[in-house]
Amino acid sequence: MTQINHSIVVKKQCAYKDSTGTRCKNTCTLTHPYCEKHTESELGFKVAQSTVPFAGLGLFTLKKIKKGSVALLYEGEKLTVEQYNKRYDKEGHGEYGMTLGKKHVIDARKTSSGLGRFVCDFTGSDKKANVEYLDNEGVIEIVAKKKIKPGEELLVDYGDEMRTAMGFQPEKKKKDKKKKSDKSEKKDKKKKKK
C-alpha cells in the first residue's frame, strides 16, 4: 500500500506587521497566517508535538480559555460534500474535513490557513476532550467544554466513526440479531419448564 503524504508544504511570508507597518520577514509553513513567534504573541497558540501518543503535532494554548468561549475557528476550503467526496474517493476519508451543515465540508488539508487543524483527538491520552466543534451559521467554532489553562493542549472527541475511518479505533461489530433471538428462545423455554 502506498503511503499518502498529507502534509502541507505551502510557504508564505508571515502576515504580522509591527506598529510602523513593517512586515515580518519570517516564512511560515504550518502556522499561517503568522510565523511561529507571531502565532504565539498575536494568537496565543503554539503548535508542537502532541501529548497524545502517535498523534503528531498538536495545538497548545498560551492563554486562559473560559468554558463556553470560542477558542478559535476551524478554517479551510469550503467544498460541497460532492467535491469533498470526489477529492478523497480513493482514500475513503479526508483527515482534515469538517462537516458544515448537510451540504458543505471545510477541508483544512490543502490550505495554508487554520490552526484548528492541529487539534487532536483525545484517544490514547489520559485526558478528556476539552473542546468541541460547533457549527454556528456556516462557521465551525472550536468551543471550550471546560476552563482551559495556559500550556494545555486542545483536545477534541472525533467520534467513533472518524476514529475508525482514520484507523486508530477498530470498527465496532454489529450485534447479531439471530444470537439475540436464540437467547430469547432459551429464556422462554426455561420459563415454560418452571
Image (spheres, rainbow, N blue to C red):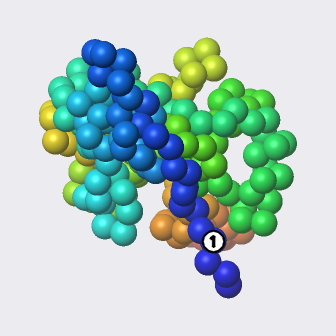
Instruction: Tell which of 193 and 133 is nearer to you.
Output: 133
Q: Amino acid at mark 1?
A: Ile
Q: Quadrant of residue 64?
A: top left
Name the spot of residue 137 as percent of width and height, x first: 61, 15
Name the spot of residue 23 as percent of width and height, x first: 38, 29
Relative height, residue 162 to residue 56 (above, below): above
Q: Residue reaching furthest left?
A: 150
Q: Residue reaching furthest bottom?
A: 1
> Going 36% across and 69% down the picture, which residue do you hit?
54
Relative height, residue 67 to residue 178 (above, below): above
Name the spot of residue 172 as percent of width and height, x first: 56, 64
Judged from the image, the secondary structure of the residue bearing numbered disc 1 is loop
Q: Quadrant of residue 188?
A: bottom right
Q: Quadrant of the N terminus?
A: bottom right
Q: Which residue is mark 1?
A: 4
Instruction: Tell which of 175 and 64 is nearer to you.
Output: 64
> Going 25% across and 36% down the picture, which residue do you hit?
40
> Going 71% across and 65% down the picture, which residue do you hit?
91
Whether residue 179 is visible, yes or no, is yes
Relative height, residue 114 to residue 92 (above, below): above
> Going 31% across and 28% down the picture, which residue do you hit?
43
Name the spot of residue 63 as percent of width and height, x first: 19, 29
Count of marks placed on residues: 1
Local packing at callout 1 (Cα closer than 10 Å; few below 14, some 14-19, many 20+) is few
Whether residue 189 is visible, yes or no, is no
